[in-house]
Amino acid sequence: MLFNTEIETGLYINGEWLKAEKKMGVFDKYSHELIAEVAVAGQADVDSAMKAANGAMTENPLPAHQRYDILMKTAALVAQNAEEMTQLICREGGKPYKDAKAEIDRSVFVIQMAAEEAKRIHGETVPLDPVKGSENRIGLYIRVPVGVVAAIAPFNFPSNLVVHKIAPAIAAGCGVVLKPASTTPLTAIVLCKLMEEAGLPKGYLNLVIGSGREVGDYMVSHPGKKLVSFTGSPAVGRRIKENSGLDRCVLELGNNSGNIVHSDADLDLAATILARKAYSSAGQFCVSVQRIYVQESILASFTEKMVAATNSLKVGNPLDPDTDIGPMISLQEAERIEAWIQEAVQGGAEVLTGGTRENVIVQPTLLRNVNRDMKVVCDEVFGPIASIIPYKTFEEAIDMVNDSEYGLQAGVFTQNLDLAWKAAKKIRTGGVIINDASSYRADHMPYGGVDKSGSGREGPHFAVEEMTDVKMIVFNLQNV
């Protein structure tokens, strides 16, 4: 077994698994059974982790071919252990089996792509003779590791969003101090073990577990780090930016994804995709479908199809391969979603399907007659709620999508190329997805947002660029 529940673990610092006085439980999100207890880090542990990461980079810089080999071996090990890791995500994260399996497959791809990027890091020559007096000078720049990366990952993708941070960092030659979400640390522990097995030298990857307020805030303000890579809420992202000093921040924050369904769209396709992407992972991911703007002439037809597609989804035990929707990450979150639904209904919204909660399970909920000031519209739901909102003209739909503090991704369903291109140009988000939902992500594409959705881009190539600095080199040739 990759994870032995009889062995207390959770702190991996300078190549050693350490115990700690303080422990925390990790629970099955569906059955509430205690899965394991893990060690909780203190500030001294973060200090040790930062020292180890900086020491590894200074004392044992890894050439590109070695970084490539380590990452490719890691990818192979993750693939070999996919079934066990899939079930672990189901249990600690409450994610349905089919989604957890897809997440592991994506993780393998991300690590492989990061490995390839390790071989592609390069610079360029810079002609200097356009400057008078520099005729005998030759310039070039190279890319060098930025320094230690403080990686803070969320609960909703306990494997893929971890590897989106640590794999590009290793590819770039950076040391890493990783803090996974306190609710889902076990998958990160497994990934550390597999990278160790793949030959990653001690110090390059360090794992600390604890709350964001205690461990996370200390990491962010620590002088030993040079870049913060964070995925989470805008409120925490703002706090990170304020507390990280002059160090670089890559912030993947929230969204209230707008999706347009125009009158010429394939309605069956749109309803099927939007229902699946509104409610998969119980809606607990940044680009989950939330606002669905539908042209008035097709409103009745699309609504009927969307209700049917939503009702076809199976809710239940994440370990059941047929389950589409599992539990919320916690009872507190499930109660919050229930309160948001009730608040919308009290404000005049109508529940077309769903709207109920049983313990940590919230039924996939589709609303209409909502308004822009309701939380389910203007805020990030991060739960299984979507709303259908009518519009008259395509230009009005674009304006409604843009009527948001967020700007991560949007989806547009239309067969008209001119309209698709108009949406792509005028919608203010980091990504515009045509004839698919806002949720679409290929893991090698640049992924990130604007405004409250964050700054910087993920995707191995783009993350490596974030995690390297440009160093300019000039030769003054005397005897040319």
Image (tube, grey):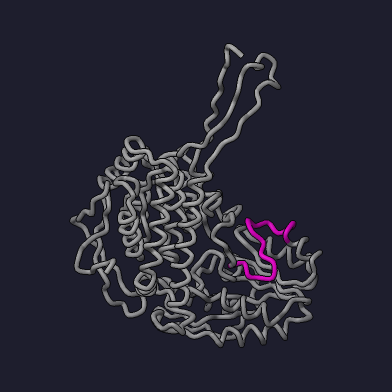
Measured from the top left, where is residue 345 in percent x and y? 57, 80
Q: How far across and how far down the image is residue 125, in percent?
A: 61, 31
Q: Position of residue 431 (x, y in %)?
A: 64, 59
- Please tell me which residue is depicted at 67% across the width and 87% down the height of the picture: 304
Front position in the image: 475 or 44: 475
Question: Front-most of 320 and 122?
Answer: 122
What is the quadrant of residue 52 in the picture? top left
On screen, 102 above or below 248?
Answer: below
**Horizontal side, residue 216 vs residue 144: left or right:** left
Q: Quadrant of residue 133?
A: top right
Q: Is residue 228 above or below residue 447?
A: above
User: 168 or 74: nearer the eye?
Assistant: 74
Q: Which residues are magenta?
A: 424-439
Q: Quadrant of residue 327?
A: bottom left
User: For the point 46% across and 84% down, which residue is it?
Assistant: 322
Residue 371 belongs to magenta span? no
Left or right: residue 83 versus residue 382 is left
Which one is nearer the viewer's eye here, 479 or 282?
479
Q: Position of residue 324 (x, y in %)?
A: 49, 81
